[in-house]
Image: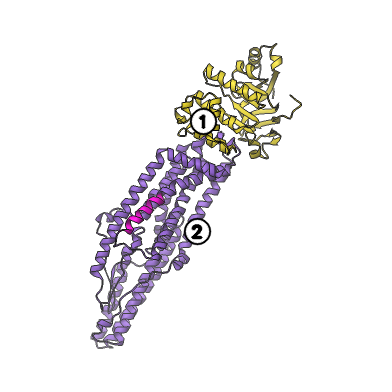
């Protein structure tokens, strides 16, 4: 896996907010094609900030984010061509139908060559009910919105996908379906960075799992290593441990 | 990219209730305004038919201007009857609006609808453009794509501008088409051109307020905060600032009252009559003296009054709303500049008549020329201030959009 170039790379990345809080502290991370990297951590550990830095929503204090080798801060528009994003609560245009939302975000992502049939196919792929295709999104459940969110990510056909707690609040069936889609995308060679609180699913889907605490990546294990270790125990131990020295 | 976002905005507007409320509001207000003002115009035209001077009568009357249906301005003042006598000009009521409600409320002409209602509507389209997307969470998803913030803002502006301008223009065009079916209302080619220019100016005005709405939206985190700020700004720009200049200018420029002017004229008249009774000079020389002295008083008053008006206008221009009103009324031929030109023409007419009478005394009424007023050419109107007002309004809109961009590139999308 390390023979290939990483699709997502954080190089000595730090973010200190104006109020002095150090949200990300010298983070080094590389995610390769066909790899799912799960970031675990308590609220405020720096998971969402890391994703925000990759999306150039906030500038880093030090360090650099790269997407497919492109410096996100220097060339954000070029970098964003190669990344798709699914947030915790996929918020879409409520008055638009699923298809209209998909059409808008696909075009925004640079996919102007798609047909109505392409949209139907991708919505079928994420198991969105056929009758929902032309329904207004404001009537959708959270699970349906998450499915539509992932279809937006799929249709962009970007090599990297950033997921910010995507299964939070989903029922077990919807969460399982969601992870099945992630597994498919992984086999297609996508590099996936997923922040989550769900230790069990992180172990299930992640090729590597990292734990963040106070902005630092304090632990990283591969899928193979986790076969012999108890991730729940490791996670709880880290959460209970003393605050990190500044 | 701008086109994609603009189309999304138009679709969002078409799928929301706001758009239909605006179209309905525009249709009702513009329709009602044109109906009322067209009726007012016809009444004044009938009045004109009654008071129009017969051949030889030394009376200056200007017919009502059909563009007053859209921008009434000072048309009623210009449409009064000016009776020329041996000692000066007597102003009669002339054609007056029969609608008594106009005395209590602002004349609901097209200009008023645009100035007050459309500005508010444009703000309502712009106030939540950035903050609503942030609150709804769609801004993050949008900016996770290769869309620059400039393109997002420009797309939003364009989409909302089209959503506002197209229905308003369609409603206005429909209103004008219905008006043109009325045989009493006839627009010359020049007036049609002026009307087209007023409609274009309306678009600049909408653009100004839409840019302001988007600017405040990009400066605030919540749509509710943006709305409160914009309602305050709207009241200030539309109602307070355009009147502030007049109050301030009155403190700075001393203009005698109309009553004082009238008193002085009376004194001149009495003095000359007494001199004549004492046997000094002949009547023609006294009449000439009265006329000359009245003209001097009038000219002095005019200079001071013009200074007051110019100062008021310049202070009022702090609000581009005032610039919009000045430009639209001048283009329509009902503005302050046109009224000044008209009054100068009436004075010239009076001087001509007096010179004529004194040169050949006796019953020569049939020779008295009829008064004809030719409106200033559009080029002159634009050059004498309207173009500046249009440019000022456009510059305000561009400035607000540029500031929105600066605010948006620093905007925290989280």
Chain painted in yellow in the figure: A
Of residues A180 and B45, the one drawn nearer to the viewer in this rendering: A180
Q: Is residue B342 visible?
A: yes
Colour-to-chain, purple: B
Q: Is residue B246 above or below residue A26?
A: below
Q: Which residue is mark 1?
A: A91
Give residue B13's position: percent from left, percent from top: 44, 40
Q: Is residue A89 visible?
A: no
Where's the C terminus of chain B, which quadrant? top right
Mark 2 highlights which residue? B391
Question: As displayed, is residue B413 above or below residue B251?
Answer: above
**Side of A166 relative to A33 (left or right):** left
Instruction: List x then y, in percent, for residue B363.
Output: 23, 85
Answer with the quarter of the image where residue A9 lies: top right
Chain letter for the residue marked with disc 2 in the picture: B
Q: Please tell me whether residue B356 belongs to the stretch shown in magenta.
A: no
Q: Nearer the viewer, residue B329 or B15?
A: B15
B378 versus A6 height, above or below: below
Q: Sort mark 2 into few (<14), some (14-19) or many (20+) by Cα contacts within 10 Å.
A: some
Magenta span contains residue B173: yes
Secondary structure state at the residue bearing disc 1: loop
Residue at disc 2, secondary structure: helix
Q: Which residues are magenta?
A: B168-181
What is the quadrant of residue B86 in the picture? bottom left
């Amino acid at each position: 896996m390390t023979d290939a170039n990483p699709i997502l790379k954080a190089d000595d990345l730090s973010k200190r907010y104006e109020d002095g809080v150090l949200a990300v502290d010298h983070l080094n991370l590389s995610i390769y094609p066909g790899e799912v990297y799960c970031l675990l951590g308590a609220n405020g550990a720096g998971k969402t900030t890391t994703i925000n830095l990759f999306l150039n929503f906030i500038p880093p204090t030090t360090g650099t984010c790269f997407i497919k080798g492109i410096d996100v801060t220097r060339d954000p528009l070029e970098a964003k061509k190669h990344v798709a994003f699914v947030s915790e609560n996929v918020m879409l245009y409520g008055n638009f139908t699923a298809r209209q939302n998909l059409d808008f975000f696909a075009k925004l992502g640079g996919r102007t060559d798609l047909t109505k049939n392409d949209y139907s196919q991708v919505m079928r792929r994420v198991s969105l009910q056929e009758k929902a295709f032309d329904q207004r999104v404001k009537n959708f459940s959270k699970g349906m919105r998450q499915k539509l969110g992932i279809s937006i990510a799929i249709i962009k056909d970007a090599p990297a996908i950033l997921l910010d707690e995507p299964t939070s609040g989903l029922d077990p069936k919807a969460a399982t379906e969601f992870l099945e889609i992630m597994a498919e995308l992984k086999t297609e060679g996508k590099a996936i960075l997923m922040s989550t609180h769900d230790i069990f699913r992180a172990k299930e889907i992640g090729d590597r799992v990292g734990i963040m605490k106070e902005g630092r990546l304090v632990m990283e294990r591969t899928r193979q290593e986790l076969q012999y270790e108890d991730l729940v125990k490791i996670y709880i131990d880290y959460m209970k441990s003393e605050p990190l020295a500044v | 990219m701008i086109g994609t976002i603009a189309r999304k905005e138009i679709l969002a507007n078409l799928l929301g209730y706001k758009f239909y409320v605006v179209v309905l509001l525009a249709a009702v207000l513009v329709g009602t305004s044109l109906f009322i003002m067209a009726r007012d115009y016809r009444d004044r035209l009938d009045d004109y038919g009654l008071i129009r001077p017969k051949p030889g009568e030394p009376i200056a009357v200007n017919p009502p201007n059909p563009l007053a249906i859209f921008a009434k301005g000072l048309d009623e003042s210009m449409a009064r009857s000016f009776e020329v006598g041996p000692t000066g000009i007597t102003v009669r009521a002339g054609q007056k609006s029969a609608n008594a409600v106009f005395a209590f409320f602002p004349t609901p002409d097209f200009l008023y609808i645009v100035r007050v209602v459309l500005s508010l509507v444009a703000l309502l389209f712009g106030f939540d453009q950035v903050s609503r997307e942030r609150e709804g969470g769609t801004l993050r998803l949008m900016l996770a794509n290769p869309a620059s913030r400039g393109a997002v803002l420009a797309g939003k502006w364009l989409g909302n501008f089209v959503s506002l301008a197209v229905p308003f223009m369609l409603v206005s065009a429909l209103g004008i088409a219905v008006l043109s079916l009325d045989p009493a209302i006839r627009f010359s080619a020049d007036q049609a051109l002026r009307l087209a220019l007023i409609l274009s100016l309306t678009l600049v005005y909408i653009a100004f307020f839409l840019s302001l709405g988007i600017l405040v939206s990009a400066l605030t985190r919540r749509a509710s905060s943006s709305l409160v700020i914009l309602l305050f700004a709207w009241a200030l720009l539309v109602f307070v600032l355009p009147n502030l200049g007049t109050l301030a200018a009155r403190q700075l420029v001393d203009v005698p009252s109309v009553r004082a002017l009238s008193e002085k004229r009376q004194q001149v008249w009495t003095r000359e009559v007494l001199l004549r009774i004492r046997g000094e000079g002949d009547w023609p020389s006294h009449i000439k003296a009265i006329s000359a002295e009245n003209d001097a008083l009038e000219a002095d008053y005019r200079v001071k009054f013009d200074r007051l008006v110019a100062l008021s206008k310049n202070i009022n221009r702090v609000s581009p709303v005032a610039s919009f009103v000045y430009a639209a009324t001048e283009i329509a031929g009902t503005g302050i500049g046109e009224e000044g030109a008209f009054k100068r023409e009436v004075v010239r007419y009076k001087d001509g008549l007096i010179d004529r009478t004194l040169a050949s005394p006796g019953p020569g009424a049939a020779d008295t020329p009829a008064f004809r007023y030719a409106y200033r050419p559009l080029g002159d109107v634009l050059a004498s201030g309207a173009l500046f007002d249009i440019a000022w309004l456009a510059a305000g809109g561009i400035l607000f959009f540029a500031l929105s961009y600066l605010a948006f590139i620093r905007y925290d999308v989280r």
